[in-house]
Image (tube, helix red, strand yellow):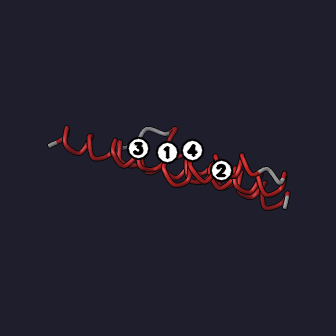
Amino acid sequence: MTVLLWGMVLALLIPIAVACRPSDVWDRLAAFSSVSSKVALIILVVSVMRDDRMLGLVGAIALSAGNAGMLLLANLLRGVER
């Protein structure tokens, strides 16, 4: 399980590197959306490892509702650009 967790943390570094370099707003939004999904999955894995249902609930809520705000922001930016 620990190897899986370290692999997930290493996979998390890729979109963080994309978000840090100067690029288009849409690329950054996609990178931040990917980061939020991966962090929510890491929270779920940690909750299974610790047998903590409350932490798993937080991870599930972050996974289901976390990207909704990112999509609303993307639609808002698309409307501003037109």
Mark 1 → mark 2, Cα distance in angstroms: 21 Å
Q: Is residue 74 left or right of residue 11?
A: left
Q: Residues within 10 Å of mark 1 (few under 14, many from 20)?
A: some
The mark nearer the N terminus, 3 or 1, is 1
Secondary structure at badge 2 equals helix
Q: Residue at x 55, y 47 (%)?
A: 36
Q: Residues within 10 Å of mark 2 (few under 14, many from 20)?
A: some
Q: Which residue is mark 4?
A: 17
Q: Residues within 10 Å of mark 3 (few under 14, many from 20)?
A: few
Residue type of the residue flagged with mark 3: Gly
Secondary structure at badge 3 equals helix
Identify the disc placed on residue 32. 1
Q: Which residue is mark 3?
A: 69
Mark 3 → mark 2, Cα distance in angstroms: 19 Å
Q: Residue at x 57, y 44 (%)?
A: 17
Mark 3 → mark 4, Cα distance in angstroms: 22 Å
**CB of mark 1 within 8 Å of CB of mark 2?**
no
Please name whichever residue, 78 or 50, is drawn nearer the observer in this view of the structure.
Answer: 50
Residue type of the residue flagged with mark 4: Ala
Q: Nearer the viewer, mark 1 or mark 2?
A: 2
**CB of mark 4 within 8 Å of CB of mark 2?**
no
Q: Nearer the viewer, mark 3 or mark 4?
A: 3
Q: Is residue 45 left or right of residue 82?
A: right
Identify the disc placed on residue 57. 2
Relative to 56, say whether 81 is above or below: above
Please name whichever residue, 66 or 75, is drawn nearer the observer in this view of the structure.
Answer: 66
Q: Residues within 10 Å of mark 4 (few under 14, many from 20)?
A: few
Residue type of the residue flagged with mark 1: Phe
